[in-house]
Image (tube, rainbow, N blue to C red):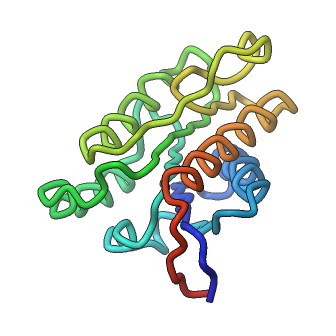
Amino acid sequence: MSLVPDVLLLVDSRGGLTEQLAEAVAAGIRDVPDVRLRYRRVDDAEPGELKEIQGLIVGSPNWSGMTGKLKEWFDHSGDLWETGELAGRVGAAFTAGWSRSGGTEATLLQLLHLLFSHGMVVVGLPWSERMRRSGSYYGATAHGVMTEDDRLQARQLGRRVAELTARLFPEPRIADQ
């Protein structure tokens, strides 16, 4: 048993660029010892698991928006929306696609809309010189192939969410190993 808040990293990927970005986000979460990472592909997660976590980072390939599978998964979280059970928890998003102009910010905004609708505290990326080449204020991104800048900004997003989760949820809770 561990006595730390949980951050769920939920990703829809078939092992490509989005998965590579998710691995970098996961590394950032692991940088923070005061939280526990739950890494799940959308096929292996249940919306009810959202009640057990204090932070959520969600990632989708950019298909000019999030994937239908991820949207359907979130559609099943409507009961949590109605009860407000996720309000005040920490959330963030990331996406990857083949073209910088292919709608990555639209995908991030769709993902963030889901987090905002649940009343979550949403974390983005602050301006940095790296953002000229990689990332968005709205979350981590990658285009075409993974670059070192992509990895670094994704890791920064994971770390920012984990640190804020640890600060907002300092009271330990019992979580399964």
Residue drawn at (40%, 39%), measured in percent from left and top?
Answer: 111
The residue at the far left in this view is 82
Residue 59 vs residue 134: left or right?
left
Foreground pick, 115 / 68: 115
Residue 4 image-quadrant placement: bottom right
Residue drawn at (72%, 37%), measured in percent from left and top?
Answer: 156
Foreground pick, 170 / 145: 170
Residue 174 spot, x, y in % from top left: 52, 83
Residue 10 spot, x, y in % from top left: 51, 58
Q: Quadrant of the C terminus?
A: bottom right
Residue drawn at (61%, 66%), measured in percent from left and top?
Answer: 39
Residue 148 vs residue 109: left or right?
right
The residue at the far front in this view is 171
Residue 46 image-quadrant placement: bottom left
Residue 69 vs residue 3: left or right?
left
Count how many numbered circles sit on residues in the image. Answer: 0
Residue 79 spot, x, y in % from top left: 15, 64
Residue drawn at (36%, 33%), measured in percent from left and top?
Answer: 110
Q: Quadrant of the N terminus?
A: bottom right
Q: Is residue 65 above or below residue 32?
A: above
Residue 149 spot, x, y in % from top left: 82, 27
Q: Is residue 163 above or below residue 51?
A: above
Q: Is residue 12 above or below residue 121?
A: below
